[in-house]
Each structure stands twice: as C-alpha cells, then as structure tokens.
Amino acid sequence: FVVVVNEEILKKDNLIATLPFIEKAYLVSFKIKPTLYSPGYKNIIHLTTGRDWSEFGFGTPCVWLDDTGKVTVCSAINWYPIKCYITLEAVSLNQWSSIRVSQNRINSIYFLRVYVDGMLKIDIKNSDPRSFKNVKVYNADPWYEAQPTSIKDLKIFNGNVEQLIEDRETPLVQNKLVAVIPILDKIYKIYFYVKPNSYSKGWHNVIRFIINSDANAYDDRVPGVWFHNSGDGSLSITAPQNGNFNSSFKTAPIPSKVWSQIEISQQLEHFAYMYTIKLNGEIVFIVENVQPETYENVYVYASDQSYQTQDGFIKDFAIINGKADNENLPDTLILPKDFVIVVNEEILKKDNLIATLPFLEKSYLVSFKIKPTFYSPGYKNIIHLTTGGDEGEFGFRTPSVYFDDTGKLAVWSSINWNPNMAYITAAALPLNQWSSIRVSQNRINSIYFLRVYVDGMLKIDIKNSDPRSFKNVKVYNADPWYETQPGSIKDLKIFNGNVEQLIEDRETRLVQNKLVAVVPILDKIYKIYFYVKPNSYSKGWHNVIRFNIGSDANAYNDRVPGVWFHNSGDGSLSITVPQNGNLNSSFKTAPIPSNMWSHIEISQQLKHFVYVYTIKLNGETVFEVENVQPKSYENVHVYASDQSYQTQDGFIKDFAIINGRTDNEILPDILILPKDFVTVVNEEILKQDNLIATLPLLEKAYLVSFKIKPTFYSPGYKNIIHLTTGGDEGEFGFRTPSVYFDDTGKLAVWSSINWNPNMAYITAAALPLNQWSSIRITQEQINSIYFLRVYVDGMLKIDIKNSDPRSFKNVKVYNADPWYEAQPGSIKDLKIFNGNV
C-alpha cells in the first residue's frame, strides 16, 4: 500500500513507490488543490508497470486534468490496454477537491468508479479486470507536464474498498446503522476521519462493529471507537484481541474541530495476525492476535445505540474486508437512506449526485428553499430525481424541477400515463431572496394529486390517475443534463409517505386551543416535524403542539406526543410520548435560542423488528428508546397549541406528519382543518397570483384590515387584495371584497352589495407614496342593519348601507390576484376576521 498524508507540490518524474502488485480490486484516493489550468493534459498520478501508454498495465490507472480543469482517468478496461473517461465538470481552482478512483467488485462484477468530493462521476463496468506486478507510482509522471497543484492524503490500497460513509462531513448520529457485513474476515482494514466539536466526561461513541454475541452488549465490539470517559479528548479503541472482547487502547488526546484519521487493521504478517492502530498515519499500537476469528452478520454503526454520541463529524469511512485477492467473501450491505435531509446552504452545482434512494413511493415529499441570483435563456435545473436518464422513460423525471428564463418554476413528473409532463407556475420567483418550494404527491381519499407549493401557497394541483413507485432513484442537485440554476439551496427534505401538511411553511402564531387536524387512526409508525421560534421564555409549562387522544387518563397526561417549553423557563423543551405504556414519560432537551427557528422531529419507526421512538433537534438525534408497547390511537386531535396550558409566546411553521408505513394505502386521511381567519404580520412585497389562504366561510359581518406602502402609481387598476369564491367578477362572491389602486393613487373597493355582485366605491383622496397607510374594510351589523365601511388611517371614507348582505363558503384570499397587475408596494399586518368586529 501507499499512504502520504502531508501536503506536497506535484513534481514531474516523481517516483514515490513501487507496489509488488496491484489487484483487480483497488483504491487510489487523494486531495488536490490546483492553482491554474493551461493547454494540454497535465498529470497528477500515474500507476504503470513500465511506460506511458499502449500496453496493459501502463495506465492502471493514471489521472490528469485537461486544460479546462476536468478530471481525466485512463485505465485498462474491457480488453482495451488504455481507455479514458472525462468528468463533465471542472474541479475548482485554489481549493481542495477529493478524488477517489477505485475498481470495485460487486456481486462478482467489477466496476471502475471515479468520485469527486464524494459524488460518483464515472461508473463503468469492466468485464476484463486484471492484476499487475511491480507497479510504479508517480506523482507526477515523466511523460507529461505536472499539473500545477498541491496533493495530500494520498492512499493506494489493494482490495475491495467498500465505502460506508463518503468523504463528506457527516454528523455522527446515535443508533445510525450504516452497513451489515455478512462475514467479517480475520484480515481487514478499517479507516475513517473524525472531527470532534467538544469533549465532555463519559463514554461517547464514534463507530462500533457489533456481532450480537453472548457477551455483554457493552463489550460487543469488533472493533469500536469511543472518546474516553475522562473527557480529555483521547480515544479508546477496542477490538477482540486474544479472545478478550473488552481489551482497549487509549490514545493521546486529539484536537477538537480538526480532522484526525484513524486506521484499525488486522493483517497476516509472517504467519501471525497483527492487530494495528494508526493515528494520523503513525502506528500507536500493535499486538499479535493469537486467537483471530471471523464473524457473521456484523452490524456497523456510526454511532451506536448504547452510548452517548460524540458531538462531531465523521467522513471517508471505509473497510477492506479479507485478503486483497479474495473474491469469495459476500459483499457488505451498505444501507441506503430512505430519506434525504440537507440543512446547510449550498451553491447549486452541475452533476451533483447527493444520494440514491432505494425506492420512491407513490406518495412522497420533495421540499427545499431556493435563492436564485439571476435568470438566463433556457431551462436551468435545481433538483432531479431519476432512475437513470434525463427524460423519455417512466422514472427519469420523478420529479425534476427547473427555472425557465423568466424565473417561473417548471416541475416535470411522470403523470397520467405520460413519463414526463411539465407544469409551470404563473408567476416568477424573486431574485436574491429565499423562496420555499414543496413538491408532493399526496393520496387523498385513495386518489393521488401532484401538488406544488411556493411559499406555502398552492400553485399547481393535478390529479394523477397513474401513480407509480420507483426503485434506486438518484437525487441530483443539480443534474448532469442541463445548465445549473445560478443560486443557493438549503433545507432540502425528501421523504417517502403521505406527507400531510398541518401548518404551511409560513410563520404562524401559536394560538391557545387551536385545533389544526383530526387523525382518525394514528399508526404505530409515524414521523412528525415542525419548526418553532419562541419570542421569550417564562416559568411555567407553555405548550407548542399536542396530539390528544381523549383517553381516560388525566387531560394533562394525554399526549401522543406533545411538546412544551419546560417549566423552568430556561428555554429547554419537554417532549413527551407514550413510551412503554407510560403516557407521562418525557425528555428534556438543551435550551434552544429565542427569536430563531429550531427544527423538531419526533418519530416512531420499525427497525429490525422493534419499534424505536426518536427525538431529533435541528437534525441531531438527542433521544432514542425502544417502545416495547407500541399502540395505534383513534380520533387523535392535534393542537397548536392546546387548551390546558399557557401557549408559548412564539411561532410555528412547516408542521407535518407522515402517518403509517410509506406504502400503507389503507389508513384514512387526516382531516386538516382550514383556518377561519387570516393573520400575516410580516412585511411582504405584493405579488400577482399570490393565494395565501382559503377561508371555509366568510360571514355577513367581517373585517379585512392591513397596512399598505405603495411605491408608484401607473395607468390601470392595480390589485392589493381580493377575496373570491372563484373568478374575478360578475357573480356573487367573486368580489367580497377586492381592493385596488387606480392610476391616481385613490383606493377602489369592490364588493357584492344591494343585489349587485360587484359594485365599486372610490376614496376621494389619493394615498401617499412610500409611506405606510392603514386600511380597514368592514361589513358591520348595527341594529340589524349591515353597513360596508372603509377606513383610511382611522378615518371613515366610505359608508354604504347594504340591504342584501350575504355569507360565502370556500373563499380564496389573494394578495394580489391573478387577474390584475399587482400594485407595486408592500403589505403588512393583514388581518381577516369573521364576526361583528
């Protein structure tokens, strides 16, 4: 093998090693930081049995950058002595990029694979794999100019390197099973990088290989790595040496917030099995294992379920199992994630494969926030889920999302027997600010609908009579077939299952005794998530959400689950759930910050035949336990917040539930209750075709009030707000009311009044530009008589008796509507209430 950790400048004709052999299965990985590109191919690394080109073994492999910075990999493959493959994208100048070239054996078939920054870029089946002897390793070779760059972390290993976690910063998560090894051989090599954030007393796990032996669970490790109980930053690394499952070695302390490499291996050397630990490339412990064993069905965790998880990150976690030339060992089962979560902001990049889902069900959710920086001609990709190619077959767009050249969102999906059908939103998204996108396929009364929401507003709603599920779905953001949309993405979530949105992804005030949904049957398997933003804390229990089963238990203990701010007033959360039959069990989190959004996820999932109840805070698992008495519940009422406690002073958004198994089509739909009022506090720019709510009922007596700051006036009516049962005008309920500016800045209010479905009233004076004006429109009942009244800055401007007041059902609220241009300006403090205000 070859390992070179330190950074070095590439030099031409730099022979660094000669390997006695390179097997059919191998790994070559390194990091490079190129400083410039210039015409012609520039060499980085070259493995050869002799010369540059034309014979088997002369490039096995070799790696260059071309004049545009694209990675070129050449190797002997499929009866060719040398064949080259080029990545679609260039690597960045003056920053480190991680390159991994490997030939892997999967089910007895070999594949040449190239990864850049943990993303698979080249994947070629090799039907003619070969091993070679006396292989020289150059970085760089004598035949080409050397690429101007630095190189570090060079690793060349023989054997089938199975990558458990990619070379990307990955948070350590409690009880995270990453792989199952059918047979762990006596000979193996395991390596990974770890970066701790901080240290504390107590054992904190990083990785653990579990054999489910008869030994005590705490001693079941082949091997395992912990941060030491002392809290000094040292590692405790264990392995079954000489039959002792609990033997361990304590390293020197490693630094926090810095990557350290750990390597644990057991190799056959001169007829003895030597167990070795390396820290940052240096041997720190070695011993002969006189009782080496193979183990079956080894579960690999990062980290395990029995200890606290180390606060920190892991990357580049891999194993070489067995001798390098052993082709008989079964493949490691590397567990794919059945969901995707990427919280941090990232710049969109072309050909950026971030995950492969083992399946995508008929019901799913894809949601994210996007901040585009500019628009240009042609479709620009944001995200693309595909079973393989770009378009033309079922599963190739499931879905894919683009911007067109005007900034409108285009969503493509397989729908109604068409493998790729496009739907485009009516309005463009603003540049240089975050917009929230949600694409879902929902099952409602056994019928499927493809729905697209922008900033919590439904923009596309299509019945899909031919819903399909797909296997092995690749997730790109962005794809390799289209130019990438210039911009950033964050808060990406992809979930299987019927995601039922209880509260939209819009800041919504917590209100006492606010029933938001009724769940006919809450299954044993569920996932609940939401964001909460507290304004302040005070002593006493303050409720956020509560799932109420109406049981015979005391009302204060009736929660499946419930979330409160803790009685202490320190900003911590108390999260309760019926664990093992106890309705009043709870977990107290660390305090969360005020005036900031925090993400809460509560789930109960079936894992390896047991029900596991999990709490996550901002994506990190903070509590997990087996529920040995899982139950389903009927007629669960969902509050945000409940009636029995004080309400937390603050806001909630993006409150959703996935109820039951992702493929369960039998559970009845959740009844999501529409709001009977509208409140939007924050300032927003008026946008055309902006549907913000649907009221189940607008009574004869009502209030519509808001503040408006117009920026300029122009010819024609410009809409501010429009309440309608359907269309623009001509029928009762189509303007109830609607509000415009005319070209002089006077306010025009239209409403159904005195047997006329749309009657207009205009204020006598214009409103000032670039300052806030307060508008209040009411229909009031006074001594059994109704009056339509309009106030501007508290002054009554319009007062009309209405002898034909009417109430309307299913009233849509737009600010602004789709029929008129939107008034240039901002709106805030919008309130719509039923009743005689």
Image (tube, rainbow, N blue to C red):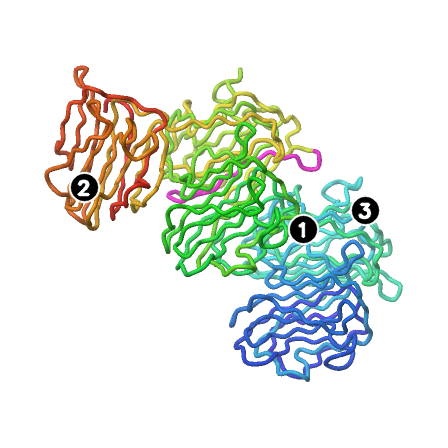
Q: What label sits on residue 67 in the rendered view? A: none
Above or below, 415 against 694 in this view is below
Q: Nearer the viewer, residue 215 or 831?
A: 831
Label 3 belongs to which residue? 296
How far apart are the alpha carbons under marks 1 and 3? 18 Å
Q: Amino acid at mark 1?
A: Ile
Residue 801 picture quarter: top left
Residue 643 is situated, as x and y percent measured from the top left of the image, at 41, 23
Tell me the crowding category of disc 3: few under 14, some 14 to 19, or many 20 or more residues within 10 angstroms, Cα based: some
Front: mark 1 or 3: 3
Q: Residues within 10 Å of mark 1 (few under 14, many from 20)?
A: many
Q: Contact (CB < 8 A) between labels 2 and 3?
A: no
Q: For the image shown, how many numbered marks are present on the structure?
A: 3
Magenta-colored span: 592-609
Residue designated by label 2: 773
Left or right, 311 with reference to 186:
left
Q: Is residue 593 magenta?
A: yes
Asked if residue 193 is among those painted magenta in the image, a careful observer would answer no
Residue 342 rendering spot, x and y as whole percentages? 53, 50
Instruction: Identify the secondary structure beneath mark 3.
Output: strand
Amino acid type, mark 3? Glu
Residue located 53% across and 17% down the image: 551
Screen quadrant of the C terminus: top left
779 or 506: which is nearer to us? 779
Residue sitting nearer the eye, 34 or 384: 384
- Residue 271 lies left or right of residue 157; in this view the side is right
Tag 2: amino acid: Ser
**Which badge, 1 or 3, comes first in the chain's sequence?**
1
Counting residues from the N terminus, which is met first, the one under dot 2 or under dot 3?
3
Quarter containing the N terminus: bottom right
Q: Reply above or below: 160 against 504.
A: below
